[in-house]
Amino acid sequence: MRLSGSITALATPFDVSGELDLDAWQRLLRQQLDAGTQGVVVAGSTGEAAALLDPEYDLLLRMAVETVGGRIPVLAGTGLSNTLKTIELTRRVAALGADAALVVTPPYVRPTQAGLVAHYRALASDAALPIVLYNVPGRTGCDLLPETVAELAGHPRIVGIKEARSEPERMAALLAFRDAGFAVLSGDDATACRAMLQGADGVISVASNVVPGMFRRLCDLARARDPGAADVDAQLHELYDFLGVEPNPIPVKALLARLGIGHGLRLPLIELSPAHAESATRLAGLIQQLETACRTVVAA
């Protein structure tokens, strides 16, 4: 499996009572498919995986697999702080039909680089699913270094990395050993265009929850080294800034709610601060204009 292009780290919609909003979930999935999204992640950090009960997790994944119907890859977030638990969860999502597992470095426990190699090799050798490494040290307290990734990239079941560090030097270091069996994906919306112009295969995006058409267009242009990518990216800078005003996924879920998808979050995450509410409402209107304009351009 070769992952590339615009891949959305899906938010999980809840209804006003805090239960899963399955109608909104299906609408979100269909919107992604209609806009040309090239892969989705279910129950990652943007999907509030830590707040989901096991039956809820399974239901979301099963519905995603059924709705997508094999048209694009469905990845499931399975990264936990313990290797055996991660293996068990990865086996479970494989049985539910996921195409690959997105596995963040073990949060909080801060393993050594040798421990990370042992962790990922044990998971990949179990062979339940292809594995995509995920490095986001700002959330986990653990940085998966490029030389460690190089040790892991040769494993036939480790098929890529989502790299959330934004420095161009980090992306360049990873691209140095990319090959046909190992994809390098940006995990940072604000620098994804630059990463793809450097040679990255695509992005696993939060922003594409609300601008899936724009992100597909951005990825197509950037991967083709088309100068027009910078123009598309410039139109999204305000969105990138807004998505960082409070911890993910608070801002993106505020936008989704204003766009008719879901109503809130689960504790300890709370609603967007009132200070940002006006910006969210205005930005939701801008998003609708951008997506409409993008559809017009693609149709032409």
Image (cartoon, rainbow, N blue to C red):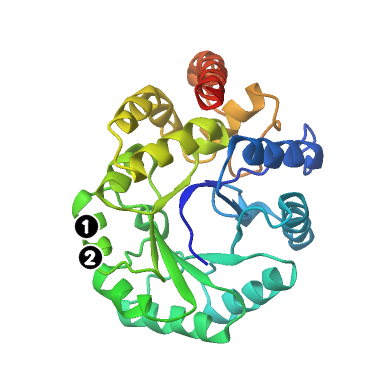
The amino acid type found where label 1 is placed reads: Ala
Disc 1 crowd rating (10 Å Cα; few below 14, some 14-19, many 20+) is some
- Which residue is pictured at 65% across the width and 72% down the height? 89
Q: Is residue 18 left or right of residue 279?
A: right
Measured as percent of width and height from the top left, residue 219 is found at: 42, 41
Position of 275 relative to 190 (above/below): above
Measured as percent of width and height from the top left, residue 35 is found at: 60, 35
Which is nearer the eye, 185 or 297? Answer: 297
Q: Quadrant of residue 115?
A: bottom left
Query: What is the secondary structure assignment of the residue under circle 1?
Result: helix
- Which residue is pictured at 42% across the width and 81% down the height? 155
- Residue ID for mark 2: 176
The amino acid type found where label 2 is placed reads: Ala
Query: What is the secondary structure assignment of the residue under circle 2?
Result: loop
Position of 104 relative to 60 (above/below): below
Residue 251 visible in this rendered orientation of the protein: yes
- Residue ID for mark 1: 172
Measured as percent of width and height from the top left, residue 75 is found at: 59, 60
- Which residue is pictured at 31% across the width and 66% down the height? 178
**Contact (Cβ within 8 Å) of mark 1 with mark 2:** yes
Measured as percent of width and height from the top left, residue 81 is found at: 51, 71
Q: Please, which residue is most extreme toward the front here?
A: 300
Q: Please, which residue is most extreme toward the left here?
A: 169
State how far apart marks 1 and 2 are (Cα).
6 Å
